[in-house]
Image (cartoon, helix red, strand yellow):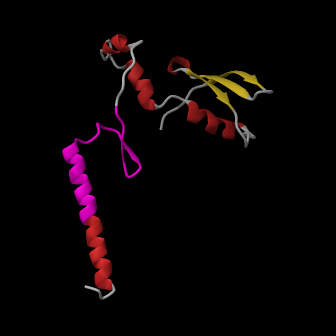
Amino acid sequence: MSNLKYTVKSFDPVKKILTVDFGVDGWASITLASPLPTNQKELEAVIRRYAPAHEQVQAVKEPTDLSYIDQMVGNSYTTTRFRLNGELIEQEAPTAEELAELENAEFAALEEKVVQVLKNRGLL
């Protein structure tokens, strides 16, 4: 747990937009949604959701060479995404060989289930 320092810089009561400053850690423009917070504790719960994550704050302080990103600015790229059973995989897509292994493993597991159902019903 860590302390989160913030300052409410402005509030538009008609549009229900709150501007919150997190100091050196950034700021947020928050449009309040229904159900609206009814007290400071509820509002702080909303503000916490918009605060930068600890990892984001740390990243700003890390001395890492990211100059390669400058060369990417203004250029279009295509990358791949891979989902397995509806879950987004946060790594490169498996090769065709790895995908075949996954499919074979899934088929084998399904085959075992079918055999078990047939045995349970006395058909095998």
Residue at 19 percent across and 46 percent down: it is 97
- Relative to residue 37, is residue 19 depicted above or below? above
Q: Residue furthest left?
A: 97
Residue 117 lies left or right of residue 33; in this view the side is left
**Outermost residue toward the right in this view:** 14
Q: Is residue 93 above or below residue 121?
A: above
39 displayed left or right of 1: right
Quadrant location of the C terminus in the rendered image: bottom left
Which corner quadrant of the image does residue 35 belong to?
top right
Q: Is residue 54 magenta?
A: no
**Identity of the residue drawn at 25% across and 42% down:** 94
Residue 91 is inside the magenta segment:
yes
Task: Report the magenta residues as a range.
Answer: 80-108
Q: Is residue 57 above or below residue 36?
A: above
* Image location (x, y in percent) of residue 63: 32, 16
Give me the residue at 70% from left, 34% from top: 32
Q: Position of residue 101 (x, y in %)?
A: 21, 52
Place of residue 110 in the rendered image (x, y in percent of width and height, measured from the top left):
30, 66
Residue 37 is drawn in which quadrant?
Answer: top right
